[in-house]
Image (cartoon, helix red, strand yellow):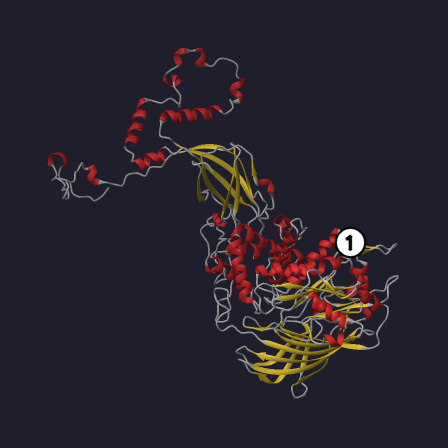
Amino acid sequence: MSKRSIRYVVAGVLAAALASTSFVSGAHADAIKQTKAPFDDKFRQLEGEDWPTPTDYRNAAGAPGYRYWQQKVDYDVAVRLNEDTKLLTGKETITYKNNSPDSLPYLWLLLDQDYKRDSISKLTETVSGDSISLGQVRRIQRMKEWEGGFTIKSVKDASGRPLKFTVVDTLLRVDLPTAVRGNGGETKITIEWSLPMVENKVVGGRSGYECFTGKGEDGNCIYEGAQWFPRLAVYSDYEGWHNKAFLGSGEFTLEFGDYRVALTVPSDHVVSATGVLQNPAAVLSPAQRDRLTKARTAAEPVYVVTPEEALAAEKGKATTEKTWVFSASNVRDFGWASSRKFVWDALGVKQEGDAAHPVVMAMSFFPKEARPLWDAYSTKSIAHTLKVYSDFTFSYPYPVAQSVNGPVGGMEYPMISFNGPRPTKDKKTGALTYTERAKYGLIGVVIHEVGHNYFPMIVNSDERQWTWMDEGLNSFLEFQAEVQWDKKFPSRRGEPKDIVEYMVSQDQVPLMTQSDSVIQFGPNGYSKPATALVILRETVMGRELFDRAFKEYATRWRFKHPTPYDFFRTMEESSGIDLDWFWRGWFYSTDHVDISLDKIVKARLDSGDPDAEAAVRKARQGTEPESRTAANNKAPTVIDRDPKVRDFYDQTDEFTVFESARKKAKSAREDMTPEELAAQDFKDNLYRFTFRNIGGLVMPVILKMDFTDGTTETVRIPAEIWRKNSKQVTWQYVSGKELKGAELDPLWETADADRGNNVYDGAITPTTLKIMKFPDASNRMKDANLKVEPGGLGTFPAPDPKKDGDKKDEGPK
């Protein structure tokens, strides 16, 4: 920047009248009501109006309060998979510790398999269009002959006495003979149940089985268990029981606890599950146990169950069973997968500075149909995810992280995830190849689903209410991990330019909409919040402040139940940046970004020299085209023909400077102080840019200026430029350089929907600014020609009757 270039970051609000618009406010619009003129306060504080009042349980800074509590639920489960009938039968003992201050006379549990024909989810399904897919027809046929859902056989207390229970759609209420007291009271219940597994490729859902029955296949299946046992609903300080039925979209917030799970499956199956295997000697061969140990310190993934062992298992079908026992501490759910088709590889991932888990075992389970894609990328994607996510949040707090290939395309549970992409099998030759899309699809989905361990499996938000709190935050971190895997990674969510089409679409709802009511679930729950956080990090807050605040939020709420307001407050409190305008625009509205650069004015200061100013005015007039009429009139005018009508005004023009003006200017300069003279002689250009907010979403204004000397300068104007007028503002920039053109958002970082109004190559309007002089304050002493002598106060002389007459004091005129 040249010595004469001076940045004046001064926002000016246009005085022009605004177009009529309705006043938009928070939930309590009458608290402050604009009645004199249209005004939309995009910077109005959400605190105290839209956000809940802070409490002792969660404070105003966005942190858990000093009286914060949450429940603890432990499970001891035994379940058996019948491979012939595809039926799960199980028995669980639940220990419920009530840390709330309330006595609880009943417990609510979740039965989230929503395949009952009379369920709310099933009865409220809607259709559209005038076509139907074969897959939809297959599902209709299957649901006519098959019905899923839990069968609750019994519920008993610790002494074995039956307890009354009621099934309410996908919920189970258990009435207790004596309320479990608050502040640490405990109760135990035992439930026996059964659950038919879903053929996932036909019926859909988040779990189920897939059998390989095509030409040349052996009929073996992969089983994935999710939402497979009755689980306690959350009881929280901000909602009480979280007992909203599962309608298909809103996922599963749950309580933390310790698990012991015994899975009985065919003896030739390999099992992957939440937690750590407790009986490896009973289910793995000595060679497999040895490989698992070596994998802990290996540089590359090691096969625990080799492809050859898996292929051999597929050729037979065991008639005996084995029980795999897993234990997990401080988790909020439990998932598993089982198949004789599984190849299993593992790699130890070191965590620096983590004494509890210095090595995490990254492991993948997949059939031969997933090779060679899964061999190459799954486990290494897990390792990469742990590193990137931990950098943004906290060290991974569990001993294992797993990725399983099966019928579910992408779903997450503590320490285990289900992921779908596979190579393509040639129908004629049987050869396996994979597309670029499958490669990046696998890496991306593994990052996403393993990343869900952080959000919401550890930072335990309520997915049934606020989808963006787990999917959006996780998609944001997925984007960070993808671009650290490969700068050219074809990420679907995160780049601001990629969200524009959705932001201007009609069928959308605010991010704060309850999960089951969300329209365009993917863009709303995943893409928009991920993009919002990218913009918040890169453009609004800057990486240092954002990363500090984001880590603060994650650390504060790990293994706890945060709400959106805890996130919003933490991000503001930790960074010191007021972001209410950002939350309102991106999370509470469907406004989009469209800022146009409408006008540029090049201003100069009036020098005070009448000759110089006349020359400037004359030069500007010379740039104007001659009147078309005057140019076409060829005949001489009266002035041309008759000298007698010419006078003083025909001999001079408005640019003629007279000596009186020169004397007045000279006198004015002589009256100036040195500081005033320096201001009067300021020569830089004052560029005035007019910005218009068309999309409604206020954002920082990023202005790139191109100068005639070939240089460019970019100024990042904070969003607060819109605080007094969210529709149109004029902003001033001072430089000694000559401006050639300007562009808004040159790096496409704000999701501006219309780039056609971002570039200004039009004429830059010239103007001259006169230095405003304030009139002298009223000085009656001066008017009276009174002089005050040093050391005394002046006295007004007695009135002269000859001059003033006998006038009475009539007061000030």
Which element is circle 1 on? loop
- Identify the residue position indicated by label 1 in the image: 434
When asked about the image quadrant of residue 177, the answer is bottom right
Q: Position of residue 32 (x, y in %)?
A: 46, 58
Say which amino acid is labelled 1. Answer: Tyr
- 504 versus 81 height, above or below: above
Q: Position of residue 564 (x, y in %)?
A: 55, 63
711 horizontally vs 193: left or right? left
- 318 versus 524 height, above or below: below
Nearest the viewer among 658 and 432 is: 432
702 horizontally vs 450: left or right? left
Residue at 44 percent across and 51 percent down: it is: 36
Residue at 50 percent across and 52 percent down: it is: 40
User: How many numbered circles are shown?
Assistant: 1
Q: Position of residue 624 (x, y in %)?
A: 50, 25
Nearest the viewer among 749 and 774 is: 749
